[in-house]
Structures are given as structure tokens and as C-alpha cells.
Image (cartoon, rainbow, N blue to C red):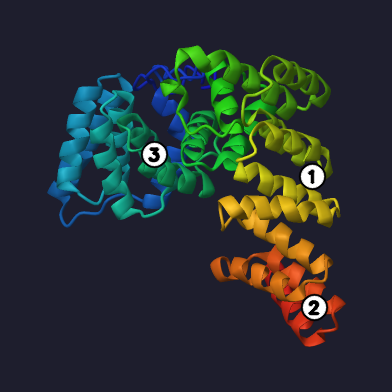
Amino acid sequence: MLVAPISEAVTKIVSYRKQQIRARRVANSTGLWLPILLVFALLIGGPGFGNAQQAAQFDDLAGRAAAARDSGNVPLAVELYGQATQLKPDWAEGWFYIGLLQYGANNFPAAIDALNHVLELKPGAAPALALRGLSEYETGAYDDSLRDLDEGVKKGAANEPRNEQIIRYHLAQMLARAGRFQDAMLQYQFFASKHIDDPDLLLGLGLAGMRNTTLPKDFPAEGRELVEAAGSAGYVFLSGDSQTADGMFRKLFERYPTVPNLHFYYGVLLFMHGPDLAIDQFKSEVEVAPSNAAAHAILAYALMFAGRFAEAQPEAEAALARVPDIEMAQIALGRSLAEAGDVKRATEVLNQVLKRDADNMEAHMALAAMYSRTGKREEAYRERLVCLGMQK
């Protein structure tokens, strides 16, 4: 089960909906967020009032809301928290509880509304960002969900182990949907490293690895066998058993010799351990799918790392002929041209990268090496200074 059980001493509040990777929302869902809630409450502080009568009224509402929450009476708790926030609109903790309770009750638009109030009061609050992102996922607001989950994780929302799994799984799906496949695979790597396994998780990993933007819940049943098998092989690799994974991938290649992105997927996994290990897989990919610009680009990049510049150049040219601004291909082409002595064109290509991404260290390092080799000491010194500044 992806959502870890918690102590019976923790207050039972709401029930999570059944999640895809066995992440079932159990009856004590607020307990999953309790460590974050405690920190959240400390950061926010208690509400202040101008007179004792108003303070007493608020305390009564807040106490009754907590009691209703503790007893599992979600509708009453939401109503009382609502009354309390009307009395004290800047009570961020109360708005957060409304959002959490509405999320657990599957009232996702209402959860988003409450969490909007929290984030107006406390911009960048990681728990609220993550919970709003999960709610947005359920409403189909996927771009918003990616934004909130991504920012929430960067701010530490996934640091609490009891919440990490559900947050990272949904973030992985949103990243793959946005075409950020490598970032998605890094999220799935968390599950493999923890040996957390499930068919829907394997499907999601397989989709990300094979560069498919479809969400697991929307993927047709007739195609699941291949993608789940690919996900299983990738999962084994990410778990640390590369030898078994290699056998699994080779069986897939024998069974599906013409399926695009299968060799690409394995190549990306191998690339993590060394670019030279991935070259054969990327070569196989461009044989299966000659029009795959991304495959030509990453093959060129791997060849560049291996010092095989003469081989890298035509692959980079092939990628850029199809997609002119693939940064990976531009870096490989610039380095290859520099090694071939075509300084003018190499400079043009590398500066194209810097025009779009001024902080690209690889482009600056390539220019520094090329200037140094051609005796342009001042230019080389300037590029090295830029690189040193980026490393601070």
C-alpha cells in the first residue's frame, strides 16, 4: 500500500478515494498530513481579535469544528470551520482544514477554493500547494496541478514520508503529460528505490520511458501489456538489478522489434550509468525510427561524451534538420564542429544555445575549450569566469 498506515492514536477524520497504485485514502487521511499541519499551524500562528467576545465566539467555533473533525463528522466540521473563517478570514489554518476535509470528501472544487485562500494568506506554503495540486489533478486542471505539485515538492511538501508517495506519483504523471519524461522517471525512481510496486505505477513508468504523454488512467487496455512490461523492466533497472533488467529488455526487443521508443527508453536508463553504455541502444532506436529527432539528438550527445565527434556530428545535424532548437543536439554539434576545426560555425551554434539559455554551462565550457585551443586567451578566460560564477 502506497499510503502508509498510521497509529490508531492519530485522529481519524476523512476517507481518501481509492488511488491508482494502491494509494487508498484511509479513514485517517488528515493523520497523513498531521506532521505538516503541526508545523503549518506554528508558522501561521493563532488569530487575533479586537475584543474578548469575538475571541470567545471564534474559540467556540474552532473547538466545535475540531471536535466534529475528530469524530469524523465532515459536513459539520466543514460548516463550523466555514463559520470560523467568516469570523476570522485570515485564519489560514482553518482554511487549510476546510481544503483537506473537502479533498477527503471528494469535493475537489471546494477544496481548491479553500486552498486558494490559504495561499493568498501564505504564498508558497508547501502543504497547501501540494494539496491544491492533488485536487486540481482530480478536476482535470492538469497544467495547474503540475505547477502546484512541482513547486510544492521543491518547497519540501514531499519531505514527510507519509505524504511523499501520493504526491510524487501524481507529480510523475503530470511531468510525463507535459513531455518532461526524464523528470518523470526520476520521480518513479523513488518508488523503485523503495521497492514500492503496483501495476498502475509500472504502467506510468512505462509510459514515461516510452515518451507517451497519456495518463495511466486514460491509456487503452489493448496497449497495456507492452507498456506494463516495459515499466516492469525499467522498475527492475531502477531498483538496482541491471542484469535482470537487461534480460527483460532484450526479450521485449525480440517480441516488439519495430516499436518506437523502446530502445530509446533503455538507452536513457543506461545513460544514467554512463553515456557510452547507451550508444548501441540509441543507434538501434534511430534504425527503428529514423525520423525520431530526440533519438538522433541523444545519440549525438552520447557520442560526443565518448569523444567520437566525427560520428556525433551527422547525428546532431539529423536531429536539428527536424527540430532546429534541440539544445542537446546543438551542444553536440558545436563541440563536434570545434573538434573538426570549424571554429566559426561552432561559435555560431553554441551562441544559439546561450541566446536561449544564457546560463548553459556546457555551452560556456565548450566555448572556453575551443578558445583556449585556438589561442584566444581573453575569450577563454571570460568563459571560464562565467563557469566559475555558475558553480558558486
Q: Earlier in the sequence, mark 2 or mark 1?
A: 1
Q: Does residue 150 appear in the picture of this structure?
A: yes
Q: Position of residue 222 (x, y in %)?
A: 49, 12
Closer to the observer: label 2 or label 3?
Answer: 2
Marks 1/3: CA distance?
Answer: 35 Å
Task: From the viewer's perspective, tell me whether residue 298 is left or right of residue 81.
Answer: right
Which one is in front, 354 or 41? 354
Label 3 sits on residue: 133
The quarter of the image holding the N terminus is top right
Which residue is depicted at the point 71% across and 31% down?
A: 266
- Amino acid at pointer 1: Pro
Which residue is depicted at the point 20% across and 23% down?
A: 75
Q: Position of residue 267 (x, y in %)?
A: 73, 35
Q: Position of residue 185 (x, y in %)?
A: 61, 35
Label 2 sits on residue: 371
Q: Which mark is residue 275?
A: 1
